Image (spheres, rainbow, N blue to C red):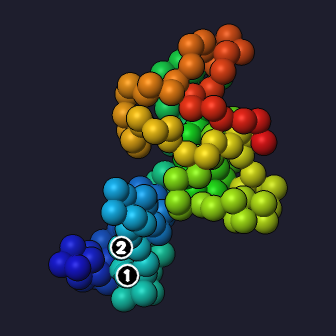
Amino acid sequence: MGEARGSSYAVARGLPWFASNTDLTIPSPRGIAPGNGAAVEVVRIATGAEPQVAGKPLPPMHRETILRTGAERPLVVGDRLDTDIEGANAGGVDSLLVLTGVTDAAQLLAAAPKYRPTYVDAGYCGGCSPGSRKCPGRTAGSRAAGGPLPCGARRW
């Protein structure tokens, strides 16, 4: 809470305010936890100010990543409809929604078109964890060559 308090003082005094993202929650091994967006909301409520959001769901972050990596068929993987998938759609790239607990099936089915992913997966497979580089459930092949997606994802 100390960081939000200090940020509120600085923003109230006119310091430019940038937020990397507005994810209200994030999945964690213990369940759903507050995300960066929760801290953004604290400062917003305390000051009445609005941050300039530098990252998702806005396209510039996605565009810059594509340029820097030279990706020809980028795939945005995320667990939130309102930042990850919306950002992919705004940037005109495919997306994979993983149902890790942030977004559930009912929210997915009720989603407006701008929040609908290209692909859906039930979540990380048994041996995977968010951010893991090795996954026993990953299948061989590359997406660029039309190969399968990781962990049994299905086209939405």
Give the number of the disc on residue 39.
2
Q: Is residue 74 shown left or right of residue 111?
A: left
Residue at the image position 62 percent from the left and 26 percent from the top: 149
Q: From the image, which quarter does the N terminus lie in?
A: bottom left
Residue at the image position 75 percent from the left and 51 percent from the top: 116
Give the number of the disc on residue 141.
none
Give the number of the disc on residue 42.
1
The residue closer to the viewer here, 15 or 125, is 125
- Tell me residue 95's x, y (percent): 66, 39
- Tell me residue 26's x, y (percent): 43, 60
Amino acid marked by disc 1: Val
Identity of the residue furthest to the front in this view: 126
Determine whether the residue tagged by mark 1 lies in a helix, strand or loop: helix
Residue 3 against residue 83 in the figure, above or below: below
Question: Image quadrant of residue 107?
Answer: bottom right
Amino acid marked by disc 2: Ala
- Tell me residue 10's x, y (percent): 25, 77
Q: From the image, which quarter does the C terminus lie in?
A: top right
- Tell me residue 131's x, y (percent): 38, 38
Identity of the residue furthest to the right in this view: 113
Residue at the image position 52 percent from the left and 60 percent from the top: 101
Circle 2 packing at 10 Å, graded few (<14), some (14-19), many (20+), is many
Circle 1 packing at 10 Å, graded few (<14), some (14-19), many (20+), is some
| Disc 1 and disc 2 in contact, CB within 8 angstroms | yes
Determine whether the residue tagged by mark 2 lies in a helix, strand or loop: helix
